[in-house]
Image (spheres, rainbow, N blue to C red):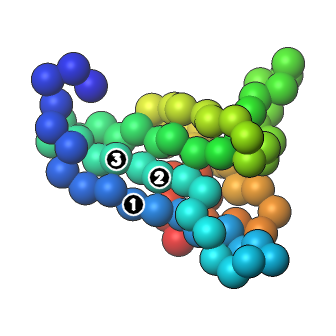
């Protein structure tokens, strides 16, 4: 990501008791890559789970697309 400029931001939303809340953000860069920052953690087996007090960061579209916690309207890749 060094030297690349952000060109777009996408948000994924989650239904909560307080209404819709953003839980994931994807930044797209001018080099064609993306970076996701979302709420969650990865367990010892490498499986992500929702945790509102922790941040997960990934540049993998495959991993971010597979992460879709309960109540989320889209995956962490913000594809919804």
Residue 30 coordinates in the image, percent (x, y): 15, 42
Q: CA distance from mark 3 to mark 2?
A: 7 Å
Please give the name of the residue rendered at 65% of the width and 45% of the height, measured from the top-left corner.
39
Task: Identify residue for label 3.
Answer: 27
In-front residue for pair 21/77: 21
Give the left or right position of residue 13, taking residue 72 as reference.
left
Mark 1 and mark 2 lie on one chain; the one further toward the N terminus is: 1
Residue 33 coordinates in the image, percent (x, y): 30, 38
51 is higher (above) or lower (below) than 46:
below
Task: Identify residue for label 2.
Answer: 25
For label 1, the SS is strand
Q: Quadrant of the N terminus?
A: top left
Q: CA distance from mark 3 to mark 1?
A: 7 Å
The residue sitting at the bottom extreme is: 19
Is residue 73 visible in the rendered image? The answer is no
Is the Cβ of the residue at disc 1 closer than 8 Å to that at disc 2? yes
Please give the name of the residue rendered at 14% of the width and 23% of the height, measured from the top-left corner.
3
Is the Cβ of the residue at disc 3 closer than 8 Å to that at disc 2? yes
């Amino acid at each position: 990501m060094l030297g690349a400029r952000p060109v777009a931001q996408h948000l994924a939303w989650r239904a909560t008791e307080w209404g819709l809340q953003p839980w994931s953000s994807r930044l797209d860069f001018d080099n064609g890559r993306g970076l996701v920052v979302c709420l969650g953690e990865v367990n010892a087996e490498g499986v992500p789970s929702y945790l509102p007090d922790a941040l997960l960061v990934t540049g993998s579209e495959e991993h971010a697309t597979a992460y879709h916690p309960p109540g989320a309207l889209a995956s962490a890749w913000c594809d919804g």
